[in-house]
Amino acid sequence: MRKTSIKDVAKKADVSIAAVSQILNNKGQRFSKHTIEKVLQVRDDLGYVPNSAARNLKGTHNRLIGIIVPSFRMPFFADIIQSMQDNAPTDVNLVFLGSTDDNLQNAIYSLVERGAQALIFGKPIPNRAEVNEFLKKRHIPYLVLDQNADINAQDMVQTNEFTGGSLVASHLLSLGHRKIALILPNKLTDNMRQRRAGFLDTLSTANLSPTTIITATLSKHGGLASVHQLIQSKSTAAFVLNDEMAIGVLRGLAYQNINVPADMSIVGYDDTDYAEFMIPTLTTVMQPVLEIGKAALNMILRRLDHPNLPFQTAFFDVKLIVRESTGPVK
Amino acid sequence: MRKTSIKDVAKKADVSIAAVSQILNNKGQRFSKHTIEKVLQVRDDLGYVPNSAARNLKGTHNRLIGIIVPSFRMPFFADIIQSMQDNAPTDVNLVFLGSTDDNLQNAIYSLVERGAQALIFGKPIPNRAEVNEFLKKRHIPYLVLDQNADINAQDMVQTNEFTGGSLVASHLLSLGHRKIALILPNKLTDNMRQRRAGFLDTLSTANLSPTTIITATLSKHGGLASVHQLIQSKSTAAFVLNDEMAIGVLRGLAYQNINVPADMSIVGYDDTDYAEFMIPTLTTVMQPVLEIGKAALNMILRRLDHPNLPFQTAFFDVKLIVRESTGPVK
């Protein structure tokens, strides 16, 4: 079966090839509504699909942005994705890829091959130098989200993680807590390290350090599993480095009939959309997720329009949201 | 800047064009490890990206499957996505697209243009006939997930929604409840209609119908907003058509100091990964989400290998998971 060509469309619609090309690339303003509709109709009748690669070279294509996230199951990324989706201009197509470290390079290669003109990374990049070189060679700009340590990225969106951790410590100290546990995911990303650093720094101003540091998998189950050790530590409060884990901690404490906040105060981080629905509602640190998604997308689009722009960065502030899960020490 | 061609790669690696082609398409088993590595190295050095469209026509490309979901924020879809991602063969690339009804056709068109060879729809398709024709003309098979009414899809994965609704009603009746409310999203998909039908059918065997039927947006906030009307109905139990809404209902009841399950039993649907972490844990109906994702992916890959296969369908059973949120009527 021969593939339908632009010539076939032009012939059947009785217009020039240039006209078809302009109309299909949304540059057909000079044509009558009748002509435009006829061309679109013929395109659909014949099932014409433009050659993507060729169109990319001419730069007339809808822009394709690839976004790579560590997991679709983490509400933080789900929120960012949704915000990009809701804010994408009509001539921009977004595709999302979940990727483990193992197949990240393959995922990147595949996206570029499909015509992705820019990438947004929502996860740490292993083999940074290699990936950076691969993309540089192909003139594919990329932006790194929520990371603080990729010096090769042209553009970056960050939140003030150090302040976030610090706000948590101040809040617990102000409630009179002195025995404070720290619950961490067993793999820390750069931004999480800053979060931890801010927390420890502020604790140390009160000459304190955590009663215990517990590590567990970054999941609700991980949080649940850390409860035994938390109880043994005799702490009166815990900072759990993210909301997903904090939800598991709340559930585990309820199983042990430990009342939050009367017996133990719990603070999460992220303010995912579940935080305000927990029983008790979860005190946490809000990152402006919707703003972050929007800023990242706008920044990378600007980069595509102006490849030689200097390094762009957006830096967002965070906010402590005090809810029911924290209270004064007994 | 001239685009690097396969000729450039062959010349620099000092092998034939055919050899480069075979090696880059994972069909280079007959070549020495040394040759293979040299070609891959040169490809990376020169930044060679194969012409996607041309490769598609020859059928040598990694297969690209596009998956379109209504929202990345619904845990049900996040789980399905993750299961597909975890189970995809290495020569299959998955891309995910979120889409509103407004831009669904545009999203489909874009995916096909990028070389998607098959599609999986996780949401109802508006303009079914039109979409079906568009895809048929281009020989793009598609599979519909979690929907019961698309007679044009070649393949389909379904769960026994009628039974699911029925199990909920039986459970509440067996606990002695006679005043049972039904809380629905204000837009029902076909599968949700079947869920509702099973529930109403089993209630009617006890000569009952819901004390009240409340509709709200499909979200935790929607569930929260329905609590006032639920309390006014003097019901002793409620079936909430999905877990997200049920989480909102639990939270709303807690604000009103109504104890679940002592004063009111609540049942959700989906068994998302939050259900077992709620306080109280949520009684719900489990759809085997991971199996569903896996089955859908395998089915569409089989369809690509054998386009003339007869209609394929997988039908999954559901299971009632009884947890803390339901108990005997007072």
Image (cartoon, coloured by chain):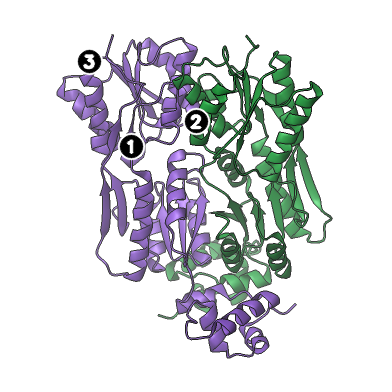
Chain colours: A purple, B green
**Residue A267 against residue A211 in the figure, above or below:** below
Could you tell me how far apart the alpha carbons at marks 3 and 2 are, in whole angstroms? 33 Å
* Chain identity of mark 1: A
Element under disc 2: helix
Q: Amino acid at mark 3?
A: Gly
Residue found at the far front of this picture: B232
Q: Badges 1 and 3: C-beta atoms under 8 Å apart? A: no
Q: Assess disc 1: are there few (<14), some (14-19) or many (≥20) residues with their C-alpha within 10 Å of its C-alpha.
A: some
Q: Amino acid at mark 2?
A: Leu
Name the residue carrying label 3: A176
Which quadrant of the figure has residue B191? Answer: top right
**Residue A291 against residue A312 in the figure, above or below:** above
* Residue A225 in view here: no
Name the residue carrying label 1: A286
Q: Amino acid at mark 1?
A: Met
Could you tell me how far apart the alpha carbons at marks 1 and 3 are, in whole angstroms? 23 Å
Residue A147: x and y in percent read: 33, 46
Q: Is residue B176 left or right of residue B23?
A: right
Which quadrant of the figure has residue A268? Answer: top left
Could you tell me how far apart the alpha carbons at marks 2 and 1 are, in whole angstroms? 21 Å
**If the image is split into quadrants, where does the C terminus of chain B sit?**
top right
Count of numbered labels shown in the rendering: 3
Name the residue carrying label 2: B224
Q: Residue at x 76, y 52 (%)?
A: B155
Residue B252: which numbered mark, if any?
A: none
| Residues at marks 1 and 3 on the same chain | yes
Residue A297: x and y in percent read: 38, 57
Q: Is residue A41 left or right of residue B219?
A: right
**If the image is split into quadrants, where does the N terminus of chain B sit?**
bottom left
